[in-house]
Image (tube, rainbow, N blue to C red):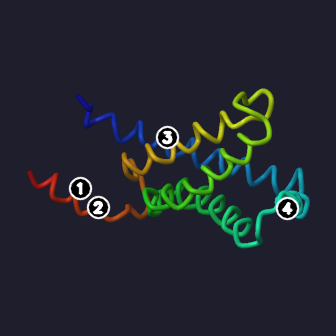
């Protein structure tokens, strides 16, 4: 059974964890590595510019909207394909284990994004997502 008192706070912890990971990832990309180096690496790997632009936009959506709870459900769904792409990118290059730079973390991150989308915006969301149609009908029961 779901504890209706603590569940929104568990979802809040999930939302803040996902958003924090995006913030730290963007910090690394801009302050440590350099976005030009990152962009060039993906171009060298054969990715078109629109994929790279979507990737960085999804990371900003995750860092800002998910963290603050602004349409967090939809923001998680927006970022999900990017994270699946990251999983495949590292799957081809490094294998599974995160300690070897593999796809373990992006895979778990992808799952967390889907869990956030299923749970909803959580407690203290600044701008909650509209309910899904099937969710609105189900709550009426």
- Disc on res. 14: 3
Where in the figure is residue 106, as x and y percent of width and height? 64, 42
Residues at marks 4 and 1, CA–CA distance in whole angstroms: 40 Å
Label 3: how many residues lie within 10 Å, few (<14), some (14-19) or many (20+)?
many
Residue at (74% x, 54% y) in the render: 26
Outermost residue to the bottom:
50
| Residue annotated with mark 4 | 35
Between circles 2 and 3, the one closer to the viewer is: 2
Residues at marks 2 and 1, CA–CA distance in whole angstroms: 5 Å
- 6 relative to 23 in the view: left or right: left
Contact, mark 1 vs mark 3 (Cβ under 8 Å): no
Q: Is residue 50 above or below residue 134?
A: below
* SS type, badge 2: loop
Q: If you read the primary sequence from the N terminus, does the residue marked by circle 4 or circle 1 appear first?
A: 4
Between 13 and 39, the residue placed more toward the observer is 39
Q: If you read the primary sequence from the N terminus, does the residue marked by circle 3 or circle 4 appear first?
A: 3
Contact, mark 2 vs mark 3 (Cβ under 8 Å): no
Contact, mark 2 vs mark 1 (Cβ under 8 Å): yes
């Amino acid at each position: 059974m779901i504890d209706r008192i603590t569940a929104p706070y568990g979802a809040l912890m999930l939302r803040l964890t996902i958003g924090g990971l995006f913030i730290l990832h963007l910090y690394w990309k801009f302050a440590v590595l350099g976005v030009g180096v990152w962009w060039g690496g993906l171009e060298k790997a054969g990715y078109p510019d629109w994929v790279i632009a979507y990737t960085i936009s999804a990371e900003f959506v995750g860092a800002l909207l998910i963290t603050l709870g602004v349409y967090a459900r939809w923001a998680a769904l927006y970022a999900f394909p990017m994270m699946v792409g990251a999983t495949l990118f590292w799957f081809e290059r490094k294998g599974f284990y995160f300690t070897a730079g593999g796809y373990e973390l992006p895979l778990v991150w992808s799952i967390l994004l889907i869990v956030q989308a299923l749970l909803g915006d959580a407690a203290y969301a600044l701008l909650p997502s509209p309910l899904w149609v099937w969710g609105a009908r189900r709550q009426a029961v």
